[in-house]
Amino acid sequence: MTKTYTDLIKKRNHAGGKSLNYSLSDECYTPSDQILPLLEYLDKDKTYYEPTSGKSSLIVDGFDKNEYKIVPSNGKDFFDCGPDDVYDGIITNPPYSIKDKFIEHCYSLGKPFALLLPVTSFQGGKRGRMFIEHGMSTLVYNNRVDFTGSGNPTFGNAWFMWGIIPSNTIYWVDNPKNGQPKKIAKPVIEKNDLFDL
């Protein structure tokens, strides 16, 4: 029985003896309620692109439940995307081991973007140079995001944004604590949900 988002990941990644192309820690399913603070800064009339979504994208679910438009990637390689492929902007929680590559590609596309990253992403030589050159703003979460459902999240998070709020601005925001939604009443994963694993 799948109890947490991490159980879902492990079950999928170990089915059929398939090897991982990246670290298991790269795949953190973002609870759909964690997009609520971000939505306050997005234009509801625009269409966004989620480049890391699969068949069970919780970010896409959160957008849909709040009547914002977002298009899932459905397996398309983000690094093959051009500006027209990403609609009006990019919203995602990228694999952390290649976050610099994601940030660099987002800047190159020239479209607004918001990437949910660990707060430690403020530091880093390559990232720092990109932030200085292009600018970066953040929504820093007051509560850590519980990606596993364990009730004990291990790191803080922020939406690193470009082209959405004024450049080089930091906002501190309250976000739902430990998966306790403020606006979304229906759980994203229910007992009898089926997943293509």
Image: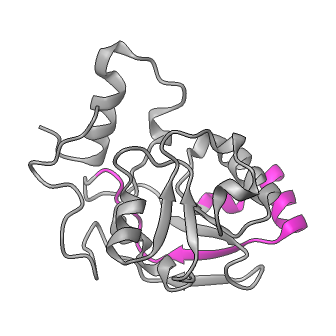
| Residue sitting at x 57%, y 66% | 48
State left or right for residue 154 relative to residue 43. Answer: left
Instruction: Check residue 176 for magenta coloring.
Output: no
Q: Nearer the viewer, residue 18 or 68?
A: 68
Q: Which of 99 and 142 is in front in this view?
A: 99
Where residue 153 sits in the image (x, y, percent)?
Answer: 36, 57
Q: Nearer the viewer, residue 99 or 71?
A: 71
Label count reads 0
Hey, which residue is sitting farthest front in the picture? 84
State left or right for residue 34 relative to residue 89. Answer: left
Figure coloring: one colour
Where residue 178 sits in the image (x, y, percent)?
Answer: 29, 67
Where residue 43 sits in the image (x, y, percent)?
Answer: 57, 83
- The answer to whether residue 118 shows anywhere in this view is no
**Magenta segment, which residues?**
120-148
Q: Nearer the viewer, residue 168 or 16?
A: 16
Task: Quarter of the image for the N terminus: give it.
Answer: top left
Quadrant in the rendering for residue 196: top left
Hey, which residue is sitting farthest right in the picture? 133
Quadrant in the rendering for residue 176: bottom left
| Residue sitting at x 70%, y 47% | 81
State left or right for residue 36 relative to residue 149. Answer: right
| Residue sitting at x 30%, y 57% | 152
Hey, which residue is sitting farthest top in the picture? 17
Instruction: Check residue 127 for magenta coloring.
Output: yes
Please say if 112 is above or below 82. below
- The answer to whether residue 138 shows anywhere in this view is yes
| Residue sitting at x 36%, y 27% | 13
Task: Quarter of the image for the C terminus: give it.
Answer: top left
Please say if 78 is above or below 71. above
Where residue 53 sits in the image (x, y, percent)?
Answer: 46, 49
